[in-house]
């Protein structure tokens, strides 16, 4: 927390959602709430005492890559509310708008789950700048599983899902189903046939 708030730093919880738009851009919405923060030891007699802080903001995020490791920059705006305890003088709440900007890294663990680490600064009324650092676990909904690629294991130019002779030696001419050519129809493929012009029926 900014020193002007006269409350100590502390942990917070957060929940958020993101809508990805293409390969690089996304819209994010977040809500934070801190634990109860103690009055700072440096606070003067007129300080309003212990408090908790809530923050909600909407951001535009740019991902520099679209791979497993995705560093990003994010910026946006929202509102912060400082909730002072009721048993201290001057206990009215303090609501104000804030701008924010952050840098982070998103790492995909599986096709659905990912982790995110980020540092973000919030700038609001009264020249107060709060800073938050956090790590989170997320899940990406709405993905369609990709079909595994169809290979050509023997390299004969016919894909495995069609190839009826899957182990053709390299360089052997094949037909449309991947089997070696047998020009004289004697049941011996051309690359092994030592008598390539055998008469039909022989």
Image (tube, helix red, strand yellow):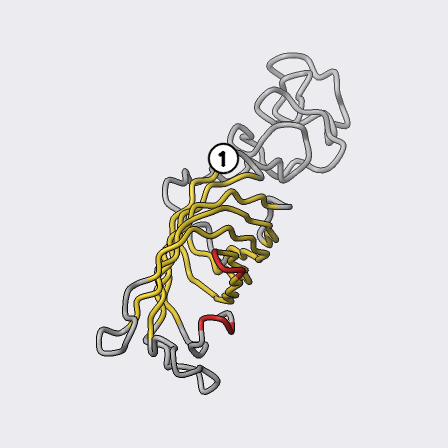
Q: Is residue 139 visible?
A: no
- Residue visible at 38% across and 78% down in the picture: 46
Is residue 180 placed above or below 32 in the rendered structure?
A: above
Q: Toward which corner of the image does residue 193 lie, by quadrant?
A: top right
Kindly identify which residue carries mark 1. 21
Where residue 196 appears, x then y in whole percent? 75, 20
Where residue 87 appears, x then y in whole percent? 22, 78
Q: Viewed as shown, does residue 135 lie left or right of 172? A: left
Label 1 secondary element: strand
Where residue 14 appears, x then y in whole percent? 37, 61
**Direction front: furthest residue:** 46
Is residue 65 placed above or below 102 in the rendered structure?
A: above
Q: Toward which corner of the image does residue 96 lie, by quadrant?
A: bottom left
- Closer-to-camera residue (132/113): 132
- Residue visible at 37% across and 40% down in the picture: 142
Q: Toward which corner of the image does residue 11 lie, by quadrant?
A: bottom left
Where residue 7 appears, x then y in whole percent? 42, 77
């Amino acid at each position: 927390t900014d020193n002007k708030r006269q409350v100590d730093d502390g942990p917070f919880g957060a929940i958020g959602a993101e809508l990805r738009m293409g390969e690089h851009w996304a819209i994010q919405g977040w809500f934070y709430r801190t634990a109860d923060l103690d009055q700072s030891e440096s606070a003067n007699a007129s300080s309003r005492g212990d408090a908790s802080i809530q923050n909600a903001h909407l951001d535009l995020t740019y991902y520099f890559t679209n791979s497993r490791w995705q560093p990003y920059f994010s910026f946006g705006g929202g509102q912060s509310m400082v909730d002072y305890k009721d048993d201290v003088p001057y206990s009215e709440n303090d609501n104000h708008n804030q701008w924010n900007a952050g840098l982070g890294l998103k790492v995909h663990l599986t096709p659905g789950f990912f982790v995110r680490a980020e540092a973000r600064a919030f700038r609001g009324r009264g020249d107060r700048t709060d800073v938050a650092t956090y790590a989170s676990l997320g899940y990406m909904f709405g993905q369609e599983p990709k079909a595994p690629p169809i290979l050509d294991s023997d390299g004969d130019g016919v894909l495995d899902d069609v190839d009826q002779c899957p182990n053709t030696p390299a360089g052997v001419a094949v037909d449309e189903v991947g089997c070696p050519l047998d020009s004289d129809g004697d049941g011996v493929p051309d690359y092994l046939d030592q008598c390539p012009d055998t008469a039909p029926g022989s």
